[in-house]
Image (cartoon, coloured by chain):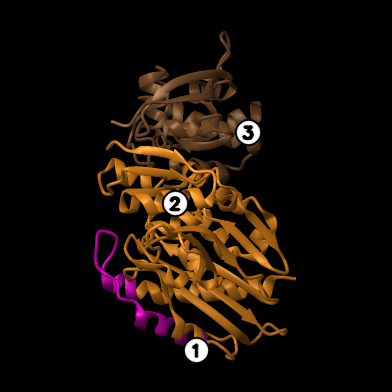
Chain colours: A brown, B orange
């Protein structure tokens, strides 16, 4: 077995150190080593987007990043979004629009939406749909999700 | 996932020495969007992943209107289409960079990795072929260059020899009155693998009525992406017309040797080569004619 590497990274603004094997994905590190279980494992091959996180400001699938690659980087996950007493506007918009049913895809959609609104605060519906194409939802039919993101953009 | 060791190389000589020493058991890690999946699904046996993203040369993204583009092997898709000058100069490259996976894939995956993965259906490769790209390859015996259409040798196989790695792609500066276009056929709007892909670049005369030269490339209709050399040559000196474009499309169809699989039949793919070649050529011509 390859040696476990020591990695220091920033997660949701806090410096975090962990040990991991090279073969552990960032998703596995988040869930199994750091017990941040918001990011979900869906397909584990980059198709479904349930594991979406923001790495150094860019949306990525955490199943397609190695934990060891995050040395010195900054990771944002769904756990970092809400303040202790207040949801993030995107989270509010998802609730208001009933943009979730089973909820497995929701953390990924919200992180993906955050990455979009961080760089494009007023997207068109077309832009929202294309940006979110890498996030799959088998419950809602997407329309409520798209409306939630547009509402969040208007509210911010 | 199988066990492997990870090394973040910081220089080209370091990466080349590791590749040379470890041979077939080592693999370059750039965006990882193909490699990590292949290793996880036991489709590729890797004992060493050599991360090249800390090497300055593979992160170069330098466009100069006189000398052209140097595109480092690890430059992610999103950086390519975020650059307005590159969007103007090489629109077919942008057409492809925007459809390789979704947003999260484009945050990690690059055109260099798309090339090294050597999928017959790679969207990134036909634009490189029509834009006349040259591969800059580093190895134990120094650096060499190779036309991009000679890089892929079979599905998943490349011309890289033991110890060699792709450093960058060099694309010449666009000529005046030239443009390019890439499109693919997929049964959905996004997030899919090409049933057929076609790219074209054209240079027109000053009046924008006659084709000076053209290049056509195809994806997913042969074991490697194809440069349709004869079809391209047919267009040189021809007036822009349906007749000339149809003749080139027919010549492109003649070199397609597709298979039938879950994405489409050989017959459908051959038909699509004709349709997409016409659309790619017309798209490139229209971009030249609409430019001011």
**Where residue B18 sits in the image (x, y, percent)?**
42, 48
Name which residue lies at 38% across and 72% down: B272
| Label 2, residues with CA under 10 Å away: few <14, some 14-19, many ≥20 | some
- Tell me the SS state at disc 3: helix
Q: Quadrant of residue B263?
A: bottom left
Judge from the rendering whether residue A118 lies leftward or rightward of residue A143; answer left or right.
right
> Which is the main secondary structure of the residues drawn in magenta?
helix
Which residue in the protein does label 1 denote?
A: B234
Residue at mark 2: chain: B
Q: Are marks 2 and 1 on the same chain?
A: yes
- Whole-Å distance between the Cαs marked 1 and 3? 48 Å
Which residue in the protein does label 2 denote?
A: B17
- Whole-Å distance between the Cαs marked 2 and 1? 45 Å
User: In the rendered image of this protein, does residue A112 appear above or below residue A95?
Assistant: below
Which residue in the protein does label 3 denote?
A: A118
- Whole-Å distance between the Cαs marked 2 and 3? 41 Å
Residue at mark 1: chain: B
Q: Are marks 2 and 3 on the same chain?
A: no
User: In the rendered image of this protein, does residue B153 appear above or below residue A10?
Assistant: below
Q: Which residues are magenta?
A: B244-270
Looking at the picture, tell me which residue is in the foreground, A126 or B124. Answer: B124
Judge from the rendering whether residue B91 lies leftward or rightward of residue B234; answer left or right.
right
Q: Quadrant of the N terminus of chain A?
A: top left
Q: Of tags 2 and 3, which is closer to the observer?
A: 2
* Numbered label attached to residue B51: none
Mark 2–mark 1 CB contact (< 8 Å): no
Looking at the picture, tell me which residue is in the foreground, A112 or B145. Answer: B145
């Amino acid at each position: 077995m390859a040696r476990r590497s020591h990695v220091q990274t920033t997660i949701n603004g806090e410096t975090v150190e962990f040990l991991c094997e090279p073969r552990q994905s960032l998703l596995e590190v988040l869930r199994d080593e750091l017990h941040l279980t918001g990011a979900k494992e869906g397909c584990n091959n980059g198709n479904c987007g349930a594991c979406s996180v923001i790495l150094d400001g860019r949306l990525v699938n955490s199943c397609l990043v190695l934990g060891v690659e995050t040395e010195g980087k900054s990771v944002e996950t769904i756990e970092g979004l809400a303040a202790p007493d207040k949801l993030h506007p995107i989270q509010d918009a998802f609730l208001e629009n009933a943009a979730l049913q089973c909820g497995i895809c929701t953390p990924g959609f919200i992180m993906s939406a955050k990455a979009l609104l961080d760089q494009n605060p007023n997207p068109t519906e077309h832009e929202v749909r294309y940006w979110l194409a890498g996030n799959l939802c088998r419950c809602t039919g997407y329309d409520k999700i798209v409306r939630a993101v547009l509402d969040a953009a208007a509210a911010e | 996932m199988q066990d492997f060791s990870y090394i973040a190389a910081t220089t080209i000589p370091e990466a080349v020495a590791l590749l040379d020493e470890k041979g077939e058991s080592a693999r370059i890690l750039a965006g990882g969007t193909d490699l990590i999946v292949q290793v996880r699904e036991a489709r590729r046996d890797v004992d060493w992943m050599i991360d090249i993203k800390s090497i300055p040369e593979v992160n170069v993204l330098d466009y100069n209107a006189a000398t052209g583009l140097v595109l480092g092997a690890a430059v992610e898709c999103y950086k390519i289409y975020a650059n307005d000058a590159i969007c103007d100069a090489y629109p077919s490259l942008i057409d492809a960079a925007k459809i390789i996976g979704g947003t999260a894939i484009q945050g990690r995956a690059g055109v260099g990795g798309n090339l090294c993965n050597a999928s017959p259906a790679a969207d990134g490769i036909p634009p490189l072929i029509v834009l006349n790209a040259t591969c800059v390859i580093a190895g134990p015996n120094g650096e060499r260059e190779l036309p991009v259409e000679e890089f892929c040798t079979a599905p998943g196989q490349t011309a890289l020899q033991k110890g060699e790695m792709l450093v960058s792609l060099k694309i010449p500066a666009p000529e005046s009155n030239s443009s390019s276009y890439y499109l693919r056929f997929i049964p959905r709007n996004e997030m899919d693998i090409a049933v057929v892909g076609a790219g074209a670049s054209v240079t027109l005369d000053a009046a924008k009525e006659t084709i000076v030269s053209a290049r056509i490339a195809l994806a997913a209709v042969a074991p490697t992406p194809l440069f349709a050399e004869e079809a391209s040559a047919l267009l040189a000196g021809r007036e822009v017309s349906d007749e000339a474009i149809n003749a080139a499309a027919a010549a492109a169809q003649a070199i397609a040797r597709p298979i039938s699989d879950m994405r489409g039949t050989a017959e459908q793919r051959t038909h699509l080569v004709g349709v997409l070649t016409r659309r790619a050529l017309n798209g490139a011509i229209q971009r030249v004619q609409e430019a001011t």
